[in-house]
Image (cartoon, helix red, strand yellow):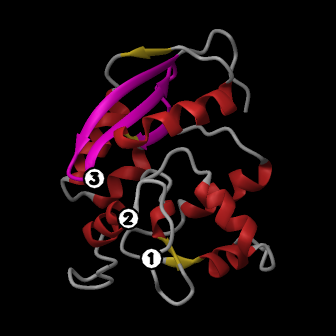
Amino acid sequence: MTTFASDRLHLDRFDTPIGRALLVTDDGGALRLLDWEDHEDRMRVLLRRQYGSVALEGGPAPAGVRRPLERYFAGDLSALSEIPWRAQGTAFQALVWRALTGIAAGETMSYGALAKRIGKANAVRAVGLANGANPVSVVVPCHRVIGSDGSLTGYGGGLERKRWLLRHEGALATTELEL
């Protein structure tokens, strides 16, 4: 996916129960990146890698992004599917990211099962790398991917956020997987 010179990117800071989220959207109202304020440096590096030298303009994210996120964090787990998003990556990454959106709230899947789902059973490590490169976390629910033994594995926003998201969605009991 190419970003043209006329595309502008906008940065909004959005309070959630698990910290302040950074929402980067484009002029068309699509979410391009969702990260966490305590990882802002990483977010800016990712933006440079994906889009080159881009100046972020401050301002509120479109209602089509903010309202579904508000509803999701308030308990309407289906609201994430309403958020328009665009992500730049390889064809393989795009395949994995689309597959992630097929994991329903309240469910988890192992990296191996996700690799099988996309028809690449031997590409478990590549699936893990693509999952970790997902620029629109929460909305493209990379947090729903866990280890084959049921353990929580890496999440760019931190394991505590991953645990909270999975509990919020009903995939974990409140006492399950304590560190």
Front disc: 3 or 2: 2
The disc labelled 2 sits on which kind of residue? Lys
Closer to the N terminus: mark 3 or mark 1? Answer: 3
Residue at the image point whose x is 67% and y is 32% from the top: 50
Residue carrying label 1: 152
How many tags in the picture?
Answer: 3
Judge by depth and name the residue closer to the eye, 90 or 125: 125
Q: Are marks 3 and 2 in contact (CB under 8 Å)?
A: no
Residue at the image point whose x is 47% and y is 51% from the top: 137
- The residue most toward the top is 6
For the C terminus, which image quadrant?
A: bottom left
Residue 44 against residue 9 in the figure, above or below: below
Q: CA distance from mark 3 to mark 1?
A: 22 Å
Residue carrying label 3: 72
Q: Position of residue 152 (x, y in %)?
A: 45, 76
Residue carrying label 2: 162
Q: Answer whether residue 32 is magenta in the image.
A: yes
Q: Which residues are magenta?
A: 9-35
Q: CA distance from mark 1 to mark 2?
A: 8 Å
Q: Position of residue 76 (x, y in %)?
A: 25, 57
Within the image, what quadrant is residue 59 found in? top left
For the N terminus, which image quadrant?
A: top right
Describe the element under mark 2 as helix, strand or loop: helix
Residue at the image point whose x is 71% and y is 57% from the top: 95
